[in-house]
Image (cartoon, rainbow, N blue to C red):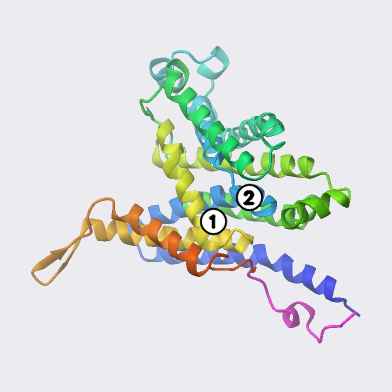
Amino acid sequence: MITQHRIRRRMATTTPILLALLLLAFVALTLALGDRAAGRMASETLIRVTLVVGFWIFAGNSGVISFGHAAFACVGAYVSAWTTLNPAMKATLLPGLPPALAEAHWHVLPAALTAGLVAAALALVTGAAILRLSGIAASIATFAFLAMVNTIWANWTPVTGGTSSVVGLARYVTPWVALGWAIAAILAASLYAASASGLALRATREDEVAASASGIDQYRHRLLAYTLSAFFCGVGGALAGHFIGVINPDGFYLSLTFLMLAMLVVGGIGSLSGAVIGVLAVSLAVEALVRLEKGFTLGTTTFALPPGSQEIIIAVAMILVLVFRPAGLMAGREIMLPARWVTGRGTSQN
């Protein structure tokens, strides 16, 4: 006889599969349109899924809002640039690189993995100090970390190019490459959420005092989640660089931080499904607003939104969601198959 606990666990295992199928359908649909702009939008959206799901691994399970995860994307993007750019170009753009990096010319896949590992190592070191704080103090500390990384990267000109853009990155990322990484991030997030560490961390999110009294080491579980989330944000930064072909420190600063937060808030920070749905909803809205800013013709009249309208409208939408549906579109629920589908028969009350 199958217990309710087993049924819930089986239902939970269907969540990453359904989310992966949803993203696969999204890619297939956008590519079927035959619109080049839609294909680019699909790639960009899936890169955001990798970033936001990585962000959710920490923020969703711990309940601590981090403003610093864009810094890990920045580090990942530059690590990938240091290892993949043509050595002759690096000698011109980044003359201060150490010889090992100056001569490196890697494929994008090992570079992306290295970018994630470097971001994770940085998270392990910085998180060791930041995560001793809680609540708003921890959030402010993560924002200070973001500002530090941006300032260092903007002024470390011989190594990062400073405020000048680093160009020439291989345009490697297609919708299918981005889809693979997005699914990998979803699987990792789902496995972590179902692990003993993920369950313990969510217990501290719900009641920090009770969790501590039960012997849960909040600091250790937070640090593990912070490190894992930084890995996928670092990979997401590398993918962004190899999608656009150009990177700049300001591309991984406040605008990206706001966008990641907006997506997580709109979808709902309480569930992995919320993180994915939030990315899809906001990305589609942004794409529609960008096209409206370019204008469309109706008869003899051309209509167009004022430049910059997308940021204002997304901000208003975020406020409305916080007011009328503070738990987000998914309200903490996961997309999963119903119990009768995973058991094939009636459920036990044991």
Relative to 96, is 272 on the left or the right? Answer: right
Q: Which residue is mark 1?
A: 264
In x, y percent, where is residue 116? 61, 37
Using the rendered view, name the quadrant where residue 1 is placed. bottom right
Q: Identify the disc placed on residue 130.
A: none
In x, y percent, where is residue 33? 36, 66
Check disc 1: other Cα within 10 Å, few if <14, some if 14-19, many if 20+.
many
Using the rendered view, name the quadrant where residue 221 is placed. top right
| Viewer-proximal residue among 92 and 219 | 219
Distance from Cα at disc 1 to Cα at disc 2: 9 Å
Tag 1 and tag 2, C-beta contact below 8 Å = yes
Disc 2 residue type (three-letter): Ala
Q: Which residue is mark 2?
A: 59
Q: Residue at x 76, y 56 (%)?
A: 207
Relative to 200, is 184 on the left or the right? Answer: left
Q: Which residues are magenta?
A: 334-350
Image height check: is 185 above or below 239?
below
Q: Residue at x 69, y 50 (%)?
A: 62
Q: First in sequence, mark 1 or 2: give its number.
A: 2
Image height check: is 80 above or below 90?
below
